Image: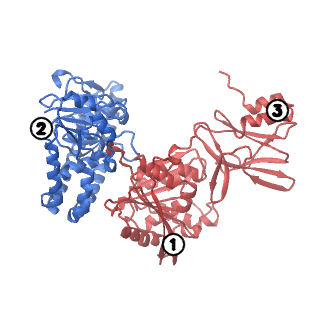
Chain colours: A red, B blue
């Protein structure tokens, strides 16, 4: 069986071509060009160098593009396994001047607190339908609240999600979300919750979205933060709302450093929470020496994780973990699964061909939330 | 006693035909508490049933009780908390017990495929299934204790508001010529039936589907092989009205069960071996015989995990 040649190679075979042919090529294909399990990034313009910038482990970063002879078109082709999703930007060098920007030929963007990136989605990747607004899904309510925290010595804002038809005559599980504002903003978590509750995938749940103030200080095993969550936030919410009064009905969730905050809070207050939902948690550790490669911000993380690995405890019953196979944290996450299991916890671990980003975390929400707080599908027989 | 169990009605509406086949003359009572807050959205149901309906509105009555009887509401909340805790432990035990069954089953299957039958000879699979049945029985016994505690804390017979509703429901049922029980949330439906101690007179013809059909059986088993991540094993939930005996009702079986996984289906059938696991898919209509037995042709899960049609002699 002969494999069809890549579009960019077919163009190369026709060189030299007039600029109008390149115009038509780009209008037809855009960028990146996905052909089977190959992705070709293209850029058009004058520059001394053009490179693809990304954070995919296993691919060169920066990844140089090559100019097609006699044209101002640049291209590079990579292998891209089915179902992959990669965020990237382009970088040009003109003399000593470097510029980094989103791919002008690609309308698909992902957003994060750091700005936006272009998205390269391989064949087989689809944005889950439960991410989009569903007019049939009855919306829950977001309530702004502020707690006076002695532990943090400040007013701590909290956004509370109450599921549709919230009734004080029923009891609800509680999910505490680190980086709460970002989960709402960049992972569409309000819409996701509305949809998953509506579809009976996830039990109606009360969610406390908690933003940090000084994330790098508060999230890697910080006693005041843990005290705030376990000793201030939890009792306050239990007093105000109708919540399940059992560890099994309480889950801490977070991504990246927020995952470390979730685990370290649970370790400091064992038995208070029943489960953790950790997404690409920054569980960096060293087996020997102190060179962890993460920079000073990771020093307290490594100290905490090393200590935990030396003496693993069982602060919760169940942990859901997800991680992108293209992110540097894949090895620490894979390594922690057997450690958690050996400590006696039930672990559900999910990987995706994605990176350390909010859309990856968004796309894994159904797996995680429905495992932690399964919805009542089993009860409904229409 | 005339009882007709139907498949789901969303895509193939047969309830009207089934009701007419009973030749009832008079009003038709409905219990659709499984529809929960949509309980009053009955226009379509009324059309299907011919219009002369009396909706018992058990779900709304249940909330009326909770609103008006604080003592009962508090006791019910305590019961729900205890029941949730029990369910959680039950699921933990169940998953571990079923993991054991599937492990033994895999090994037995592999041994068979290699031409060795020594694993089957030890009766390991039957014994592993027995462990699951034991867990089911333990759960049912503990649930019975919880109900006894609830009755002790808040005797239903002492509640004026519950008594009033019960009287009205019984009177409405007495005035009707048939009862129809649609699907919905089987937990809400069972809770409402229990709260109001609904007794369906033997002589009252009944047409039921989906959750309604499950509620008529002795033991309600929840199942959804394609359900949320954390809840995929079939589990006993509660006792039903017991009008339909010897049956585990499996509505939407084709959509909810992995029927092509013979091993998994075999475990389900063996687990509830003393009862028929009856598939109630779209278009199914089973009128029970006067002695309450299933009619010939009813589709059931066999102990081999395959789907069989019940023959007349076994019905």
How many numbered discs? 3
Of mark 3 and mark 1, the one earlier in the sequence is 3
Q: Nearer the viewer, mark 1 or mark 2?
A: 2
The residue under label 3 is: A21
Within-10-Å neighbours for mark 3: few <14, some 14–19, many 20+: some
Element type where label 1 sits in the image? strand
Task: Determine which residue is flagged by label 2.
Answer: B202
Label ID, residue A156: 1
Numbered circle sitting on residue B288: none
Residue B107 at least partly seen? no
Image location (x, y in percent) of residue A136: 46, 46
Observer-nearest residue: A352 or A334?
A352
Q: Where is residue B146? Give x, y as percent.
A: 19, 56
The mark closer to the camera, 2 or 3, is 2
Disc 2 to disc 3, how far (Cα)? 82 Å
How dense is the environment of label 2, judged by Cα within 10 Å: few (below 14), some, or many (20 and up)?
A: few
């Amino acid at each position: 069986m002969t494999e069809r040649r890549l579009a960019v190679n077919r163009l190369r075979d026709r060189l030299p071509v007039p600029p109008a042919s390149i115009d038509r090529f780009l209008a037809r294909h855009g960028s990146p060009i996905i052909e089977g399990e190959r992705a070709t990034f293209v850029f058009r313009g004058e520059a001394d160098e053009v490179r693809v910038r990304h954070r995919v482990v296993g691919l060169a970063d920066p990844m140089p593009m090559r100019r097609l002879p006699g044209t101002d078109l640049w291209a590079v082709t990579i292998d891209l396994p089915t179902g992959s999703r990669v965020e990237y930007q382009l970088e040009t060098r003109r003399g000593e001047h470097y510029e980094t920007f989103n791919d002008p030929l690609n309308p698909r963007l992902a957003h994060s607190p750091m700005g936006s990136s272009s998205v390269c989605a391989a064949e087989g990747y689809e944005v889950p339908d439960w991410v989009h607004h569903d007019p049939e899904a009855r919306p829950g309510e977001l309530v702004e609240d502020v707690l006076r925290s002695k532990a943090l010595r400040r007013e701590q804002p909290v956004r509370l999600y109450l599921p549709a038809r919230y009734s004080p005559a029923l009891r609800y599980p509680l999910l505490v979300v680190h980086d709460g504002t970002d989960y709402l903003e960049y992972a569409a978590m309000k819409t996701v919750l509305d949809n998953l509750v509506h579809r009976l995938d996830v039990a109606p749940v009360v969610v406390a979205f908690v933003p940090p103030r000084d994330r790098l200080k508060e999230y890697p095993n910080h006693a005041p933060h843990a005290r705030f969550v376990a000793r201030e936030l939890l009792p306050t919410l239990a007093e105000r709302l109708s919540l399940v009064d059992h560890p099994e009905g309480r889950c801490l969730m977070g991504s990246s450093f927020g995952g470390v905050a979730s685990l370290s809070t649970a370790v400091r207050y064992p038995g208070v929470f029943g489960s953790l939902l950790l997404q690409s948690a920054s569980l960096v550790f060293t087996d020997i020496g102190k060179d962890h490669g993460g920079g000073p911000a990771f020093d307290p993380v490594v100290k905490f994780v090393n200590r935990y690995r030396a003496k693993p405890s069982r602060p919760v019953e169940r942990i859901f973990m997800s991680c992108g196979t293209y992110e540097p944290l894949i090895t620490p996450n894979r390594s922690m699964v057997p450690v958690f299991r050996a400590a006696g916890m039930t672990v559900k671990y999910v990987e995706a061909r994605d990176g350390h980003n909010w859309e990856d975390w968004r796309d894994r929400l159904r797996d995680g939330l429905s495992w932690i707080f399964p919805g009542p599908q089993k009860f409904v027989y229409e | 006693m005339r009882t007709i169990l139907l498949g789901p009605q969303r895509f193939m509406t047969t309830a009207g035909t089934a009701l007419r086949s009973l030749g009832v003359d008079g009003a038709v009572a409905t219990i659709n508490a499984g529809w929960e807050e949509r309980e009053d959205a009955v226009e379509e149901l009324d059309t299907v049933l011919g219009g002369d309906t009396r909706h018992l509105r058990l779900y709304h009555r249940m909330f009326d009780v909770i609103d008006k009887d604080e003592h009962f509401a508090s006791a019910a909340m305590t019961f729900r908390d205890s029941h949730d805790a029990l369910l959680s432990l039950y699921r933990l035990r169940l998953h571990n017990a079923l993991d054991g069954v599937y492990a033994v089953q895999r090994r037995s299957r592999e041994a068979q495929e290699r031409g060795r039958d020594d694993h089957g000879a030890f009766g390991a699979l039957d014994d592993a299934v027995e462990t699951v049945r034991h867990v089911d029985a333990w759960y049912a016994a503990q649930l019975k204790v919880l109900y006894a505690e609830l009755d002790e804390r808040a005797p239903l017979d002492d509640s004026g508001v519950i008594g009033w509703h019960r009287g009205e429901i019984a009177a409405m049922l007495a005035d009707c010529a048939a009862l129809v029980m649609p699907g919905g949330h089987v937990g809400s439906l069972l809770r409402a039936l229990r709260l109001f101690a609904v007794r369906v007179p033997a002589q009252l013809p009944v047409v039921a589907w989906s959750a309604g059909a499950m509620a008529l059986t002795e033991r309600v088993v929840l199942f959804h092989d394609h359900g949320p991540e954390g809840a995929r094993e079939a589990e006993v939930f509660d006792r039903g009205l017991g009008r339909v005996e010897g049956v585990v009702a499996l509505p939407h079986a084709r959509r909810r069960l992995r029927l092509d996984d013979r091993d998994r289906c075999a475990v389900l059938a063996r687990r509830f071996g003393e009862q028929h696991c009856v598939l109630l898919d779209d278009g199914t209509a089973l009128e029970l015989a006067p002695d309450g037995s299933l009619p010939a042709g009813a589709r059931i899960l066999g102990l081999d995990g395959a789907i069989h049609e019940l023959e007349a002699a076994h019905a």
